[in-house]
Every structure is written in C-alpha cells, then in structure tokens.
Image (cartoon, grey):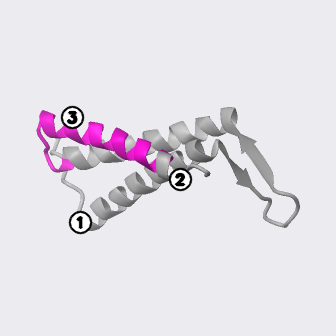
C-alpha cells in the first residue's frame, strides 16, 4: 500500500476555510441562543431555539476541530503544537461567542 500524499495548497486553504466557518457558525449559534431560518419561497421565518440549535453548533464545532487536526497532521506538527492549537481553538471559540453575543 502506498503512503498517502499531502493535500495541495488549494486543499489546505479550503480546509482552513472550513475550520474558520465552522468555528464562526458554531459560536454565532451559541451567542444568539439559536438561529432563524426562512423557507425558500417566502413565508414566516422560524426561530430554532437553543436546545435544538446546540446540536447544529456541536456539528459545526466538530467539523472545525476535525479540519484543524487534519491541517496539523498535514504539517506534521509535534504534540505540544497540537495541544497549543487545541487550547487556542477553544479560546478563539469562546472569544467569538463573547464578541457576537447580543448587547
């Protein structure tokens, strides 16, 4: 079995975008205690409250964390760097929630 090759620069940029969008989306859902959705063809919008919305936030955070781990593995990061990136990821997520909260 031949070893897997590292993704190209374009793929790494795409993965980084998924990481940023996932952490931003999850933080926005947590900060707003839910999200609003509207049907395609008009009609009233529906607010999805916190308990149900937290499932989507968890999925977005998981997507972001998996993408970050994939990037770190591609770059062959050492264990302390992975631990530092994980702590930084949590701090950034908490900061995003704090910044995006309604005032």
State the residue in front, 12 or 45: 45
Instruction: Judge left or right: residue 56 versus residue 80.
Output: right
The residue lying furthest to the front in this view is: 103
Q: In the rendered image, is residue 34 in sight?
A: yes
Residue 37, quarter of the rendered image:
bottom right
First of labels 2, 3 by sequence position = 3
Instruction: Please check the rendered image and state whether residue 80 is part of the magenta-colored stretch, yes or no.
Output: yes
User: Residue 97 location in percent, x, y?
Assistant: 49, 46
In the rendered structure, are the residues bearing label 1 and label 3 in contact, judged by CB atoms less than 8 Å apart? Answer: no
Residue 25 lies within the magenta run: no
Of residue 92 and residue 101, the one placed in the foreground of this image is: 101
Please state if 43 lies on the left or on the right of 15 as rendered: right
The residue that appears at 80% across and 50% down in the rendered structure is: 46
From the viewer's side, name the closer residue of 69 and 7: 69
Task: Name the residue tied to disc 3.
Answer: 83
Determine the CA span between mark 2 and mark 3.
26 Å
Q: Position of residue 100 (x, y in %)?
A: 53, 53
Residue found at x 42% / y 41%: 94
Q: Is residue 39 above or below residue 101?
A: below
Mark 2 touching mark 3, by CB under 8 A?
no
Identify the secondary structure beneath mark 1: helix
Q: Secondary structure at mark 2?
A: helix
* Nearest to viewer (mark 2 / mark 3): 2
- Mark number displayed over residue 100: 2
Answer yes or no: do the residues labelled 2 and 1 have beta carbons within 8 Å? Answer: no
Residue drawn at (60%, 36%) of the image: 54
Q: Position of residue 81 (x, y in %)?
A: 15, 40
Q: Is residue 22 visible?
A: no
Picture residue at 33% right of the left edge, 57% below the top: 16
Which portion, as a residue range, is magenta? 74-97
């Amino acid at each position: 079995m031949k070893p897997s090759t590292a993704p190209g620069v374009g793929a790494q940029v795409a993965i980084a975008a998924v990481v940023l969008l996932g952490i931003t989306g999850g933080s926005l859902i947590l900060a707003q205690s839910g999200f609003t959705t509207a049907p395609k063809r008009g009609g009233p919008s529906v607010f999805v409250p916190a308990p149900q919305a937290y499932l989507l936030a968890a999925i977005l955070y998981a997507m972001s964390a998996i993408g970050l781990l994939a990037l770190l593995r591609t770059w062959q990061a050492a264990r302390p760097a992975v631990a530092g990136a994980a702590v930084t990821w949590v701090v950034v997520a908490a900061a995003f929630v704090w910044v995006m909260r309604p005032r």
